[in-house]
Image (tube, rainbow, N blue to C red):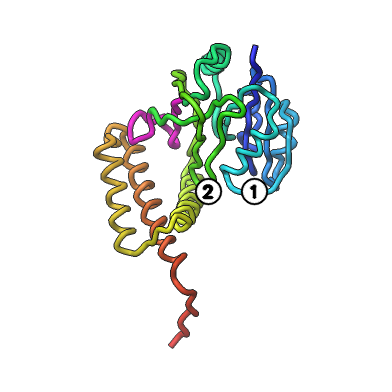
Amino acid sequence: MPTLTVIIVARNERLNIRDCVRSASFADEVIVLDSGSTDSTAELAHEAGARVVVTDWPGYGPQQNRGIDLARGDWVFSLDADERIDSELAAAIRAAIASEQHSGYDVPRRSLFITRFLRHSGWWPDRTRRLVRRGKGRFSTHEIHANLEIDGSVGHLQPPLIHYSYRDLTSVLDKMNRYSSGSARDLAASGKRGSLTSAIAHGLWAFIRTYIFRLGVLDGAEGFMVAVVNAETSYYKHLKLAELHSPRREPPKPQ
């Protein structure tokens, strides 16, 4: 039977890490790469049964690739600290690696926005590549939303990952700031430039796309909130992109 390693990249995830590691306990090995947590993440992960490696933060994709390099299993599954693998998905993963029909697999995610698991708004099925035969895939080096690039055919698992993405408004605002900053740096690295006009246009389009075309209106109040969050994230992403290309200016002196 092929063996499986689950990789979890984490920093300051004491509220999530124990349940996350336990949900992966069906695997032959669980590795937590702790990126310099200042809370009890590393200790809790170790107590839950994970092999903990404390390291720096080179970016999401490079950190995931470190995990792949550390893995001893024949297959690797990438799991975020705010995600959970239930028994149905665990069985599907085991069946997939036993069949060895593909080099890797994607999986849908069922994501929580404060009080509701969304079914629209572009949040479902939200398929993401997470399972790969070791030696057949690496993550891209993007700072935000790095992709698992698989050498060979890709299959599709049906049971979803459970994703506790936003538990309260504080986490919404925190992620919006981090994601807009990281995405701006990714765009700058690819040669893109930003402006106030493009920020406004992208923000408006993000709201319309989420709420109308991706049927966020059917997700009730949470769907509207997600559309606003997407609009603000896109707006600030392109403003921050413009800022990256602007010369530093001294603040004006008071009159």
Q: Position of residue 36 (x, y in %)?
A: 70, 47
Q: Position of residue 235 (x, y in %)?
A: 36, 56
| Residue density around tag 1, few if under 14, some if 14–19, many if 20 or more, within 10 Å | some
How many marks can you see? 2
Residue 43 figure quarter:
top right
CB under 8 Å between callouts 2 and 1? no
Quadrant where the image shows the C terminus: bottom left
Give the alpha-carbon distance from disc 2 to disc 1, as whole Å.
11 Å
Under mark 2, the amino acid is: Glu
Q: Nearer the viewer, residue 187 or 160?
A: 187
Q: Amino acid at mark 1?
A: Trp
Magenta segment boundaries in residue numbering: 107-124
Residue 29 in the image, given as x and y percentages of width and height: 69, 24
Q: Which residue is mark 2?
A: 143
Q: Is residue 226 above or below residue 254?
A: above
Residue 32, quarter of the rendered image? top right
| Disc marking residue 175 | none
Tag 1 residue: 57
Q: Residues within 10 Å of mark 2 (few under 14, many from 20)?
A: some
Residue in the foreground of this view, choosing between 236 and 193: 193
